[in-house]
Amino acid sequence: MPHPPLADWVVQRDARNGGCGLPKPPKRGEMSVELSREDLLRRLSLNDEAALESIVGPGIADIDTSELGAKTCALVRIGALVATASADASYQWAVEVALARGASEDEIVDVLLSVAPIVGAARVNAAAPGLATALGYEPELPRIH
């Protein structure tokens, strides 16, 4: 059975569903909520921009409206992802956006180095493989002899 369209679970932030971000449970005989929730979680784990926008509101993909400029805003978002120990899919999305906005690979790595004193070694170590993969590098662990 194909997944339901995005419109089946788009967030309805109003009094009808208590503003909780999920549709009301279906009536008997309708499609199950579990499938919609499953599809939502799948789309969120893949960093689907439409799914993210339906939850956090417009603006997640639109960085051209910032006073910082599109490139700087994209680099700042990478720093925020490092600080919050984000998933690899988030790094992939953010790096693609930053590169599309004119950031270089060196600038993206410099973001990691710039936030290191603030976020600490654990966050930097956790973020490095995700950023490396997003940049197309093969993260290779050093061999300990």
Image (tube, rainbow, N blue to C red):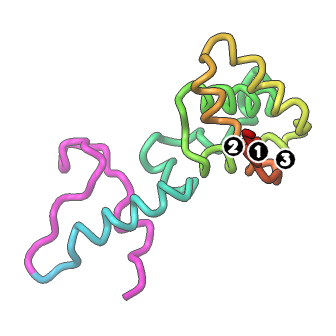
Instruction: Measure the C-alpha gap from mark 3 to mark 1.
Output: 17 Å
What percent of the width, then of the height, locates residue 17? 19, 49
Eyeballing the image, is 107 above or below 97?
above
Instruction: Measure the C-alpha gap from mark 3 to mark 2.
Output: 21 Å
Lower position in the chain sequence, tag 3 or tag 1: 3
Q: Going by the image, does 114 lie left or right of 119?
A: right
**Residue behind mark 1:** 132
Residue at 44% of width from left, 67% of height from top?
6
Please name the amino acid that badge 3 sits on: Ala
What secondary structure is found at the residue carrying circle 2?
A: helix
Which residue is most to the bottom?
Answer: 1
Circle nearer the viewer, 3 or 2: 2
Instruction: Measure the C-alpha gap from mark 2 to mark 1.
Output: 5 Å
- For disc 1, the neighbor class at 10 Å (few under 14, some 14 to 19, many from 20) is many
What percent of the width, then of the height, locates residue 114? 76, 17
**Boundaries of the magenta span:** 1-28
Which residue is most to the front?
Answer: 145
